[in-house]
Structures are given as structure tokens and as C-alpha cells.
Amino acid sequence: WNLGGPDEGMSMKEQGAIIHDVLEKEGDPKYISVPIGLFDLIINGLQWIGTTFNSAKFDDAAELGRIGKYYAVEDMLTTDPSEKYGRTTLRQHYEYIAENGQEYDPYTTVFGSKDAKEKFAQQKQQEEEAEKVEA
């Protein structure tokens, strides 16, 4: 679970606690744990729909589920000190985002600022309108 930087490996729960602290939330952090088998249920359901109805969209959704499961179960921590890099700790990274926001990243689900979220929504709407005109 090493995301780069000088930190030692952290569990998702430890990372969540840092976010809770950085955002100065009241009370104890709340976590939801689900069995990893839930991935299989969702993936198999999506794949069944994709295969049964010959749907590339559901096939793609099943593949994204497989990728998500891979990252959920595989250890991403390097134990070789020569493979670690970076000087910013995860806490420092979260503090920066909490203070300055983060531009929309299409490869994550993070909208770091209201402006970025609105800009993305406008772009998406323009793309959808353009598709309607083409059709």
C-alpha cells in the first residue's frame, strides 16, 4: 500500500484515519468493510449480462471490476528501500489537497474542488450535446 514517498506501508484504515484527521472531522472515523467475494458477485453478474445480451458496455464494466478487485487484493508495497522514492508523505499530500483542491483526474473518482467538478460537468454536457447533433 505504499503510494510513494517516505512513509511506511499503511492499511486502508490508516489512510482513512489520516483523511479524517486532515479534514478535521468530529468523532471517530467510520468505515464500511465488505467481503472481497462481493467483487466476484458483481463481476460475474456484469459478465453474464454482457455475454447474454452481447453488450460490450457490460463486458467492459466486468473488466473494470476485475481490475478493481486486483488492486483491492494484491499487495502494492515494496520492501526494497531502493525502490521507494519521493519526499512528500501521504499526510502532506492530503493536507495540500484539503487546502488547495485537486483538479479533476479522469482516472480517479476524486473531484478536489467545486470548480473542477462543475467544469467536468459542463464538458460532459457539451460532449453529450455534440453526440446528439451527430446522430
Image: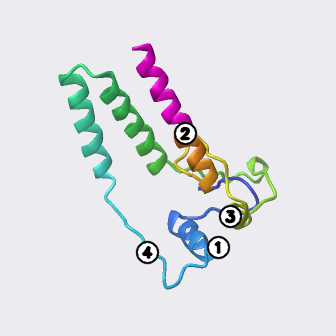
Location of residue 101 (image quadrant): bottom right
Amino acid tagged 2: Gln
Percent of width and height locating residue 91: 69, 67
The circle on residue 30 is: 4
Magenta stretch encompasses residue 126 = yes
Q: In the image as oriented, which residue stretches furthest toward the right? A: 87
Amino acid tagged 3: Glu
**Residue occupying the point 54% across, 64% down:** 11
Q: Nearer the viewer, residue 86 or 112?
A: 112
In the picture, the quarter occupied by the C terminus is top left
Q: Nearer the viewer, residue 102 or 27?
A: 102
Pointer 2: what residue?
122
- Name the N-terminal-most of marks 4 and 3: 3
Amino acid tagged 1: Val
The circle on residue 8 is: 3
Q: Which residues are magenta?
A: 122-135
C-alpha distance separating marks 4 and 3:
23 Å
Magenta stretch encompasses residue 28 = no
Amino acid tagged 4: Lys
Q: In the image as oriented, which residue stretches furthest toward the left? A: 52
